[in-house]
Image (tube, helix red, strand yellow):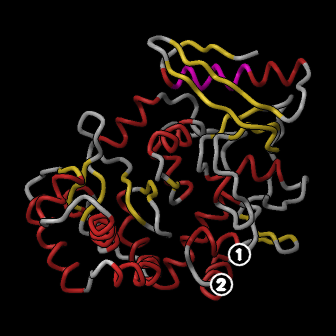
Amino acid sequence: MNRVSPNFMPVRLRNQRLAGTRFRTAAEVVGWFGAVQAQDYGAAKWALALRTKGARESDVETAFATGAIVRTHVLRPTWHFVLPEDLRWMLALTAPRVKRAMAYYDRKLGLDGRTVARSNDAMAKALSGGRQLTRAELAAVVDEGDGQRMGHLLMHAELDAVICSGPRRAKQLTHALVTERCLPAPSIQGDEALQRLAVRYFQSHGPARLHDFAWWSGLTLAEARRAVEIARLGSRGDFWSVSWTPARPSGPVVHLLPSFDEFLVAYKERRELSPTVLLNGKAIGNWRRTLAKDCVAVETRLSVNLDGAGKRALKAAIDRFATYLGLSAVADW
């Protein structure tokens, strides 16, 4: 559990956009955060919608399909949603460390620089002209089985800014060329990139510690410290933030957070990975959904007994999730 003062929690909730002002679109959420963890594609869509004024799953799907947001490996060895205009500078800043983390397994898999370069070239040729291909189709292109080697080759192609996500084909994810999916953007390097990443993190995750930022970004502690110094952020003790304005809800607020939500995974000591029920920023249990044709059943397992206001807040959270899916809600209480 990330140890943050109870006095800071209303500030973090507001900065995370789980309270106070919400965004209009999924792309605005991604731009605010800089990068949103997205290895669980379905969960990550809800994480974005949760921070909007009422976006539905179809709205987030449209943003992904049209390339308003893209999904790629960046920051750490996992997928994130990013804006197309941020992809290149974020990769330039963080991909080298991700590649170093992959080096041991690359050697075990028999992947060297020449193999990766040939694979990158083959994928680029196959995807040129606006084509989008699935992982299995790209595996056939580079003459690989769809195993761990192929996973590493795809990751290298993403880290080298050759490929990123394309639109979904039915339920299958596809890959597309970065040059065709992400328009050219001004080059951002060195201290400017460090400063920009620090501002994105602390405006959306603060109050947070330096080692939280280093964990989230994949930067070294020295790089993270340099980034914070350049960004000239405000601090209280060993916590940093862009804004210190707290959320001021009129009553209890409940959130149904998806697995791998930024509120759960973006801090070094926080490791709740499963779908989590929050009450005023405090984890009080877990939840799961069961989909039917025209409704969604939401089951909760709570560690506290809710009073009347808390139950109404939980019902509002469940109704919001059902509306996001375009379904009616069935709760277990």
The residue lying toward the viewer, choosing from 105 and 48, is 105
Which residue is at 79% across, 61% downward? 2
Q: Quadrant of the C terminus?
A: top right
Q: Quadrant of the N terminus?
A: bottom right
> Would you say the magenta stretch is mainly helix, strand or loop?
helix
Q: Position of residue 40 (x, y in %)?
A: 48, 47
245 sits left or right of 152 in the view: right
The amino acid type of the residue labelled 1 equals: His
Q: CA distance from mark 1 to mark 2?
A: 7 Å
Residue indicated by mark 2:
221
Which residue is at 68% across, 32% downward? 287
Does the magenta run of residues contain 63?
Answer: no
Q: Position of residue 32 (x, y in %)?
A: 55, 54
* Span highlighted in magenta in the image: 315-324
The residue lying toward the viewer, choosing from 81 and 189, is 81
Mark number, residue 211: 1
Which residue is at 88% across, 73% downward? 237
Does the magenta run of residues contain 323?
Answer: yes
Which residue is at 83% across, 74% downward? 238
Could one spot residue 185 in this view of the protein?
no
Secondary structure, mark 2, is: helix
The amino acid type of the residue labelled 2 equals: Leu
In the rendered image, the vertical position of residue 258 relative to residue 126, given as above or below: above
- Please rate how many residues cluster around mark 2, counting C-alpha atoms within 10 Å: few if below 14, some from 14 to 19, many from 20: some
